[in-house]
Image: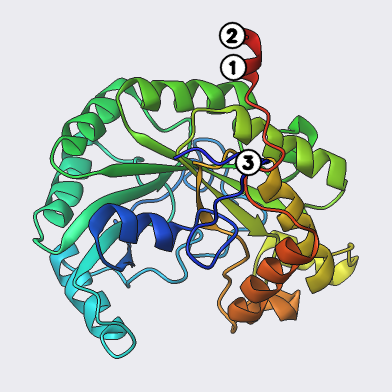
Amino acid sequence: MIHTAEEPKFWGDKRYYSLDYYLKETFGEKVYRLSLDGGMTCPNRDGALGTRGCIFCSPRGSGDFAAAPAPSIRIQLEEARERIAAKTGCRKFIAYFQSYTNTYAPVAVLEKLFTEALLQPDVAALSVATRCDCLPPEVLNLLESLNRRKPVWVELGLQTIHEDTLHFIRSGFTLTQFEEAVFALKARGLAVIPHLILGLPGETKEQMRASVSYVASLPADGVKLQLLHVLKDTDLGRIYEENPFPLFSLEEYCSFVAECLSILPPDMVIHRLTGDGPRQLLSAPLWSADKKRVLNTIQKCLKEQNLWQGKYFQDKGSETAG
């Protein structure tokens, strides 16, 4: 489906290609994501690269909404279904390995975990959150094999393209490593979903826009644009407490996200548009806890600014070919 600036085609009631729209279009019904914990750690925590993790990560390594570790993935899925049964009538689910780095284990361990999830009849797809430097050939081969059974998505944390910021947040990898991972995954037919954080300390809107433009140029299938939210018991939280740095207001953030959407490809699925920190850990900005309000305000900004996803997207490949 091609959407042009001259003839905007909206996605249901949205001006962007939402994950919800994509899932209904692909699977014919609403699909709910169930967050799981594979019991892994991260090279930024176990001493391979560091011991303190990225500065924004909570002790659970971005897995604050994941199911608590259980004897098996099947049991985690059962417990997760029970928790959401009251608010959704979904019959299909995405098994989302979220906590820490979910390819940071021997390939035999990964195969057991991922296969157990995919064997569940109501699991429609597998989503694996990981790092670009934790995808050795044997893991890529495993993911490619699993993708022949059911769709496999690989979520890659990038956060920013700027090396100074990557160093400040202790990412432990380079932009070159990230790009190599994207192309290695795509060569095996896997869906790739980069993560970006908007509002990192010291970055200007121009720098953030450059990160979004970079992701727009990649052969990525989706993207997560995440508001920087400051969590308690993190190094970022301690920095903010000692010397508060500027954060987006609700209006500033939603207006900027609308602008970012306009430069992304119209066929790139938007998996996230805001922060998602648990209320009990959230220090700032407190307005981010009202996710529905944030999403409604983004849609309002898109309408008021006459923007939609892809309006100003420039396909560099097409320009070169022409």
Cα distance in 3D space between marks 1 and 3: 14 Å
Give x and y (percent) for residue 83: 29, 84
Q: Are marks 2 and 1 in contact (CB under 8 Å)?
A: yes
Cα distance in 3D space between marks 3 and 2: 20 Å
Determine the image quadrant of residue 120: bottom left
Q: Is residue 315 above or below residue 205?
A: above
Question: Could you tell me which residue is drawn at 25 percent across and 82 percent down?
Answer: 89
Q: Residues within 10 Å of mark 3 (few under 14, many from 20)?
A: many
Instruction: Look at label 3 and name its amino acid.
Output: Leu
Give x and y (percent) for residue 298: 69, 67
Judging by the rendered image, the residue that carries numbered circle 1 is 317
Q: Is residue 63 left or right of residue 226?
A: left
Q: Nearer the viewer, mark 3 or mark 2?
A: 2
Instruction: Look at label 2 and name its amino acid.
Output: Ala
Towards the viewer: 161 or 210: 210
Determine the image quadrant of residue 245: bottom right
Judging by the rendered image, the residue that carries numbered circle 3 is 264
Give x and y (percent) for residue 169: 70, 46
Q: Is residue 42 above or below residue 81?
A: above
Judging by the rendered image, the residue that carries numbered circle 2 is 321
Determine the image quadrant of residue 312: top right
Q: Quadrant of the C terminus?
A: top right
Secondary element type, mark 3: loop
Q: Is residue 299 left or right of residue 26?
A: right
Instruction: Look at label 1 and name its amino acid.
Output: Gly
Secondary element type, mark 1: helix
Query: Which residue reaches farthest top?
Result: 321
Q: Residues within 10 Å of mark 2 (few under 14, many from 20)?
A: few
Residue 201 visible at all: yes
Question: Could you tell me which residue is drawn at 72 percent across and 56 percent down?
Answer: 257
Render colour scheme: rainbow
Towards the viewer: 176 or 91: 91
